[in-house]
Amino acid sequence: KVKMVDDNLADIEKRYSETKAKLEGDIKKLKEEKEGETERLKKEYEEKLSKVKESYAASEAKLKENAAAQAEKLSKLSEEKDEAVQSVGTLADEKARLESDVTELQLYAANQYDEGFSFAIEQVKLLFPDLDAKRLGEADAMNQIVDGKLVPYVPPQ
């Protein structure tokens, strides 16, 4: 009976050892698979992260370049605006001066015309002393002859 118990015990120990060895192998295999899967996922994650970082860096560089170009453009446009504002002031001064010159020249021309007409009337009085002085006094640089009569000049519209 002791031998049978010893045999049973030896058999149980043998099955236990085999099962234990098998389970230890399975556990080791699962750990290796898990580590391999973890390494694969880690590598995949790092690759994706690297691509995202590269994409981000490229986008950031492009945005910085764009911002610099926009800043340069803004600066240039601001300078152009300042020059245009200064030019407007200068041109306004020049316009006022030219308008003043035109007014002075118009007055000068009108005076010359009026004086010339007065000189012509004086010459007619001298050349033809027997003309009616009252009638000759009706002559004016701003009159015109219409239907044989002196009438005020009306500029065409």
Image: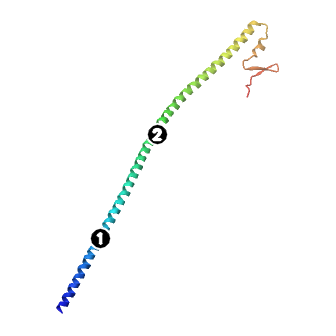
Residue ID for mark 1 = 29
Q: Quadrant of residue 28?
A: bottom left
Left or right placement of residue 111 versus residue 60 in this view: right
Q: Say which mark, if any, is on residue 140.
A: none
Provide residue 18's location: percent of width, then percent of height.
25, 79
Q: Residues within 10 Å of mark 1 (few under 14, many from 20)?
A: few
Three-letter residue code for mark 2: Lys
Q: Nearer the viewer, residue 36 or 115?
A: 36
Q: Could you say which is closer to the camera, residue 127 or residue 55?
A: 55
Residue in view at x 75 percent, y 14 percent: 137
Q: Are marks 2 and 1 in contact (CB under 8 Å)?
A: no
Which amino acid, mark 1? Lys
| Residue found at the far bottom of this picture | 1
Quadrant of residue 3 within the rendered picture: bottom left
Residue 85: x and y in percent read 50, 34
Q: SS class of the residue under badge 1?
A: helix
The span from disc 2 to disc 1 (Cα, nearest Å) is 65 Å
Task: Tell me the tag on residue 73.
Answer: 2
- Residue at screen point 27% across, 76% down: 22
For residue 102, which quarter of the picture?
Answer: top right
Residue 66 position in % (x across, y down): 44, 44
Seen from the viewer's position, the closer of residues 23 and 120 is 23
Residue 147 lies left or right of residue 109; in this view the side is right
Residue density around tag 2, few if under 14, some if 14–19, many if 20 or more, within 10 Å: few
Q: Residue at x 75, y 20 (%)?
A: 143
Establish if 116 lies above or below 60. Answer: above
Query: Earlier along the polypeptide chain: callout 2 or callout 1?
Result: 1
